[in-house]
């Protein structure tokens, strides 16, 4: 029996075409599945990334009233005379009066120290006058005693001491390190309360802290800055700190 070669060739070509089509369809199906899977993974990743970006940044405040634990009083005085020796003798008399004043109030001798001297002169109508200006500094942690001395400083004037410009008492709070941890915790708590209110209004919940920045501590007069003639510093201070906290929202 004789077989037509042309029919055989057409059959073989058809078979090969069917096989190629099946392979192409299989590859296309695999590619489609891959694209779908990749899109799902990418989309899920974008959703997670978007969720991670949800946050709120708020500030928290903490304030505390404290009493100064260090008083520094600078007393500036001067002796004036027609000769340098006389001016120095006048300044020495003032220094003795100042030391006596503080000793009577109960301050130890080592809390009062000299803090510099300045000598100047001027001539008017041929007459030269010399001025010896000196400073003495009281440094004490006895705040109540320092306040009492400040209230009675007019007694120095009665003893002949002329208080120069630059005289004045300053109170300092040096216990900042002792109150820092509690105040930072208070400021952070205050910040979380603000974040929770924001989250409540937006239908979310406050999560963990993503980032936090502690502001600087300031120590100021509790009742406002002192100033003007006859107004001195007081030992009553206010410590203040502001923190900035970034909370995640869930």
Image (cartoon, rainbow, N blue to C red):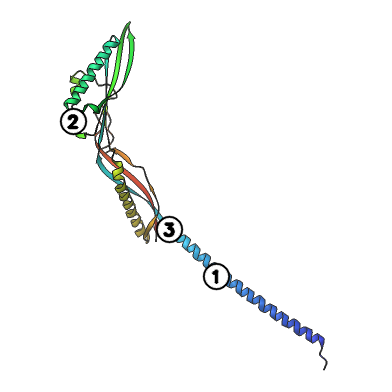
Q: Which residue is mark 2?
A: 148
Give coordinates of residue 174: x percent, y percent.
Answer: 29, 38
**Residue depicted at x 16% and y 25%:** 104
Marks 3 and 2 close (CB-CB < 8 Å): no
Picture quadrant where residue 53 is located: bottom left
User: The C terminus lies in which quarter of the figure?
Assistant: bottom left
Marks 1 and 3 close (CB-CB < 8 Å): no
Q: Residues within 10 Å of mark 2 (few under 14, many from 20)?
A: few
Which sits earlier in the primary sequence, circle 3 or circle 2?
Answer: 3
Q: Residues within 10 Å of mark 3 (few under 14, many from 20)?
A: few
Picture quadrant where residue 112 is located: top left
24 relative to 223, above or below: below
Q: Which residue is mark 1?
A: 37
SS for tag 2?
Answer: helix
Marks 2 and 1 close (CB-CB < 8 Å): no
SS for tag 3?
Answer: loop
- Tag on residue 54? 3
């Amino acid at each position: 029996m004789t077989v037509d070669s042309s029919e055989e060739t057409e059959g073989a070509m058809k078979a090969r075409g069917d096989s190629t089509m099946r392979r192409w369809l299989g590859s296309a199906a695999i590619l489609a599945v891959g694209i779908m899977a990749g899109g799902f993974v990418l989309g899920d990743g974008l959703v997670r990334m978007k969720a991670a970006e949800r946050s709120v940044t708020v500030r928290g405040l903490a304030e505390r009233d404290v009493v100064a634990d260090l008083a520094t009083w600078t007393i500036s005085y001067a002796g004036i005379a027609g000769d340098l020796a006389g001016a120095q003798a006048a300044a020495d008399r003032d220094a003795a009066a100042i030391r006596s004043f503080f000793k009577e109030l109960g301050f130890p001798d080592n809390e009062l120290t000299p803090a510099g001297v300045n000598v100047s002169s001027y001539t008017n109508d041929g007459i030269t006058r010399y001025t010896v200006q000196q400073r003495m500094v009281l440094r004490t942690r006895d705040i109540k005693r320092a306040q009492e001395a400040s209230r009675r400083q007019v007694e120095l004037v009665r003893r002949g001491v002329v208080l120069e410009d630059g005289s004045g008492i300053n109170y300092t709070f040096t216990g900042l390190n002792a109150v820092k941890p509690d105040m930072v915790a208070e400021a952070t708590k205050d910040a979380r309360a603000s974040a929770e209110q924001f989250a409540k209004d937006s239908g979310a919940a406050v999560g963990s802290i993503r980032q936090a920045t502690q502001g600087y501590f300031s120590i100021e007069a509790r009742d406002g800055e002192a100033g003007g003639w006859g107004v001195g510093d007081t030992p009553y201070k206010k410590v203040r700190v502001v923190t900035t906290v970034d909370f995640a929202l869930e």
